[in-house]
Amino acid sequence: MDFRVDLAGLRLKNPLIVASGVLGVSVGLMKRAEDAGIAAITMKTATLQARQGHPNPVVYEVDCGLLNSMGLPNPGAREMGFILEEAKRILSVPIIASVGAATPEESAEVAKYLMKADAFELNASCPHVKGLGAELISDPEAMALIVGSLKNTGLPVLVKLSAHADWLHVAGRVLDAGADGFVAINTLKGMAIDVYARKPVLGGVYGGLSGPSIHPVAVRVVYELHREYPDVPIVGVGGVEKWTDAVEFILAGARAVGVATALRKGFQVVDEILRGIALYMRENGFSSIDEIVGLAHRC
């Protein structure tokens, strides 16, 4: 059985990768993820200058998943570059650097410190940071210029989209600018209110909703992306808690699948998902991941 996947030139041993944001800046945790079977790791989003993020509380569990309002805390691109170098010395799986920038010039500066990465992911959809993310996805022309800047590095560029703004139009525009693939989706903007304190729960007021509640939305976005751009590689992200969620993404058109919120249960979830995919393929007579990518469009 062939679990290997080609993702925009990255050769992955299987379709499971760690989505951005969940492992922080710990190389030790990245190594544990690799040892658990993960095929690639996306680092925490790096911005040019260090960010402290939003005030506590920054994470709140709701019945249908998690709300986070981290605010992209990170030590800045220069320090993230040092962390990346250490990770490349210790890990053997591809590492994707996540870039947070509002202008082409800023993205070029961030990228300069992260050139040890195997690919870039442009964070164009974080729903709770002003000037970046969801605000950026509302300006396709600005995004295209940033993609062009990152492409000048010679590394593959994946653009992380979400179901905000006219994301399908944005997808076409960034492809024209040279994007090599998509990551879909980021968290969805939400909030929770403490009915006794009568105020928002999160320190940043708004947060990004992740977990099982967003999975059907993510599957729909991946399906529509693959329908419009069947030859473009996609990483499906959003609410992957079990192997059926991962297979659903692949059938919709994803070549790889990102796990994030599910890792709160421990790294054993990686093995559980991989074993489930293998059993599904064996029982249904499939010999490679390629055979099932986008199969829901052909049945």
Image (tube, rainbow, N blue to C red):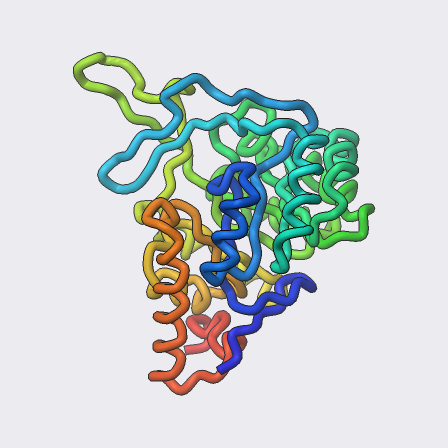
Find residue 267 and report its horizontal and vertical position in percent. Answer: 40, 53
Q: How many marks?
A: 0
Q: Is residue 192 visible?
A: yes
Left or right for 295, reference 245 = right
Find residue 88 and report its horizontal and vertical position in percent. Answer: 67, 51
Find residue 297 and report its horizontal and vertical position in percent. Answer: 46, 71
- Which is more toward the observer, 75 or 4? 75
The C terminus lies in quadrant: bottom left
- Which is more toward the observer, 46 or 128? 46
| Residue 261: quadrant of the picture | top left
Judge whether 17 appears above or below 64 on screen. Answer: below
Q: Is residue 172 visible?
A: no
Q: Determine the residue positioned at 47% across, 75% down.
A: 292
Q: Determine the residue positioned at 38% across, 41% down.
A: 210
Left or right for 33, reference 214 = right
User: Farthest left residue?
Assistant: 196
Left or right for 57, reference 72 = left
Q: Determine the residue positioned at 52% across, 57% down.
A: 34
Q: Determine the residue positioned at 36% across, 21% down.
A: 57
- Which is more toward the observer, 155 or 253? 155
Find residue 174 and report its horizontal and vertical position in percent. Answer: 68, 47
